[in-house]
Amino acid sequence: MTQAKYGDKVTVHYTGKLTDGTVFDSSNGSTPLEFRIGEGQIIPGFEKAVLGMSAGESKTTHLKIDDAYGPHRPEMVVEVSRSQMPSEIEPEIGQQLQIQQPDGGVIPVVITEVNDTTITLDANHPLAGEELIFDIELIAIAA
């Protein structure tokens, strides 16, 4: 039976959970995920878990922080003055914003703290610093 290898386009269903069992994402009941192994389209540990699987096979894999979204990096958390925020935005904890970079790039951030004078923005991925568990079902492999 054919096993998934680098360069293959694979189709998978998955459920992603935190170590406490909380589901943070799932393709079950919706469109399966498609990606080409080796192109860096998904987190490293998920890609490694699919390598060697055969169509129809299922597995559960536990990803350490470095194989998931990496550690939470304090240098990616910044405090800005409320006066730097556009006046039409009423900042709230959990609110997602995009910061325009001088080179035209955009960085997604989440507001993690709000007070009378400052707002704290976190540019880490929301799952940074977390170990993750994925239930994976390999549906198809294509060259």
Image (cartoon, rainbow, N blue to C red):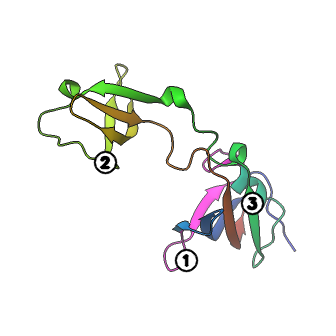
- Tell me what residue is drawn at x 57 percent, y 32 percent: 73
On the image, numbered disc 2 is attached to which residue?
Answer: 95
- The amino acid type of the residue labelled 1 equals Asn
- The amino acid type of the residue labelled 3 equals His
Q: Quadrant of the N terminus?
A: bottom right
State whether residue 74 is above or below residue 70: above
- The amino acid type of the residue labelled 2 equals Gln
Mark pair 1, 3: CA separation: 19 Å
Indicate the position of residue 20 as horizontal and vertical percent values. 63, 65
Question: Is the residue marked by circle 1 packed among few (<14), some (14-19), or many (20+) residues within 10 Å?
Answer: few
Secondary structure of residue under mark 3: strand
Quadrant position of residue 77: top left
Mark pair 2, 3: CA separation: 29 Å
Question: Is the residue marked by circle 3 packed among few (<14), some (14-19), or many (20+) residues within 10 Å?
Answer: some
On the image, numbered disc 3 is attached to which residue?
Answer: 62
State whether residue 68 is above or below residue 56: above
Along the polypeptide, which appears first: circle 1 or circle 2?
A: 1
Indicate the position of residue 139 as horizontal and vertical percent values. 68, 75
Q: Is residue 88 magenta?
A: no
- Tell me what residue is drawn at x 16 percent, y 32 percent: 86
Q: Main secondary structure of the magenta part?
A: loop
Mark pair 1, 2: CA separation: 27 Å
On the image, numbered disc 1 is attached to which residue?
Answer: 28
| Dot in front, 1 or 3 | 3
In the figure, is residue 12 to the left or right of 108?
right
- Tell me what residue is drawn at x 71 percent, y 42 percent: 66
Q: Magenta residues?
A: 26-44
State whether residue 101 is above or below residue 9: above
